[in-house]
Image (spheres, rainbow, N blue to C red):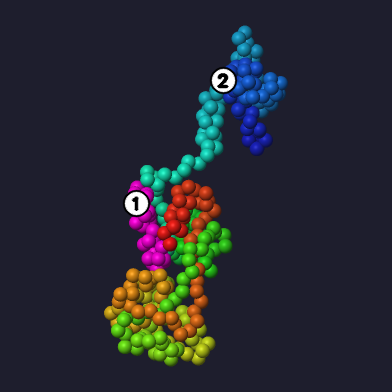
Amino acid sequence: MINLRKLDLNLLLTLNALLTERNVTRAAERLHLSQPSVSVQLGKLRTAFDDPLLLPGPRGMLPTARALALFAPLQAVLAQLEQVLQPEQAFEPATAEVRWNLAAADATEYAILLPLLPALRAQAPLSRMAVFEAVPERMAQALETGQVDLGFLAQEEAPSTLRHRTLFTEHYVLAGRHDHPLLQAQPGLEQFCALEFIVVSPSGGGFRTAVDTALQQLSQKRKVVLSVPHFLIVPPLLAASDMVALLPSRLLKNALGSLRIWEPPITLPDYEMAMVWHERMHLDPAHRWLRERIMASL
């Protein structure tokens, strides 16, 4: 059995040239090698295949039965190798029938995908996109297995094993309806804690966030009256009630007709939003094109 790890694959090119030309001199010219070099390689091939392969004949060299059996599959293998080694073709968005699988929270869909989609549909009309809910603890596995092509996470949640790029820095603002009776001026800490809050709990049912921890350190406590799993339901709830919420500022870009925003009276850390992807997709032309479109849309 021939051990591929020990076989110089260049010998296969020599064998192909010899079987095509059936002449050492012409095979050497075809390969841009000297005749003695090709003769040495023929000797190695004979040893590797345990067969003479080519024998002297009246009009050049005659292939053995083993050599004739090798010729067609050898040409097919070399053609496939040549195709593998060809430079990667550029991505043509106008004609590409590609599907992208993305993972994002609903607030991220609003902040990133909403501004992206008009240009994406115009430039890549045959493409399709599926958006899955982002689960930070499962993101690395989803990207590694190919279930997801591109994910969006807070930078601090991005697994170190993934490629990532920061998209923007986000901060939280206090939002409530325009004619909220307790929110007509910048609230102080005491007034802030007297408001009725909605919180977003992605896993469902949570009534406590890092805000409550920060308030506890100040010996303060707020009133959380509603917990929901998604961000996008919050603005219409605020507009129709006296509840308030701390929300990412980009989520409120198009909601300020009915809502009013204030800076919270406690210091809340900003966070960086990042897109993350697996190393296997880093050089893919379609994937690279999509990442560039996302950056251009922000």
Instruction: Measuring from the top left, give residue 236's x and y in whole percent.
Output: 30, 75
Seen in the picture, residue 92 relative to 237 is either above or below; the reply is above
Q: Residue furthest top?
A: 58
* Amino acid bearing label 2: Thr
Residue at position x 66%, y 28% in the image: 48
Tell me if residue 116 is in the magenta stretch.
yes
Report the mark closest to the observer, 1 or 2.
1
Separation of disc 1 and disc 2 at Cα?
A: 50 Å
Quadrant in the picture for the C terminus: bottom left
Front residue (pair 60, 183): 183
Magenta part mainly helix, strand or loop?
Answer: helix
Q: Which is nearer the N-term, disc 1 or disc 2? A: 2
* Amino acid bearing label 1: Ala
Is residue 82 among what the camera can see? Answer: yes
Quadrant in the picture for the N terminus: top right
Residue range (magenta): 105-131
Residue at position x 38%, y 83% in the image: 197
Residue 234 is labelled as none
Q: Secondary structure at mark 2?
A: helix
Residue 20 is labelled as 2
Position of 260 with respect to 137 (left or right) is left
Name the residue that disc number 1 marks. Answer: 122
Is residue 133 among what the camera can see? Answer: no
Q: Residues within 10 Å of mark 2 (few under 14, many from 20)?
A: some
Position of 180 with respect to 54 (left or right) is left
Residue at position x 52%, y 49% in the image: 283
Q: Secondary structure at mark 1?
A: helix
Seen in the picture, residue 81 relative to 46 is either above or below; the reply is below
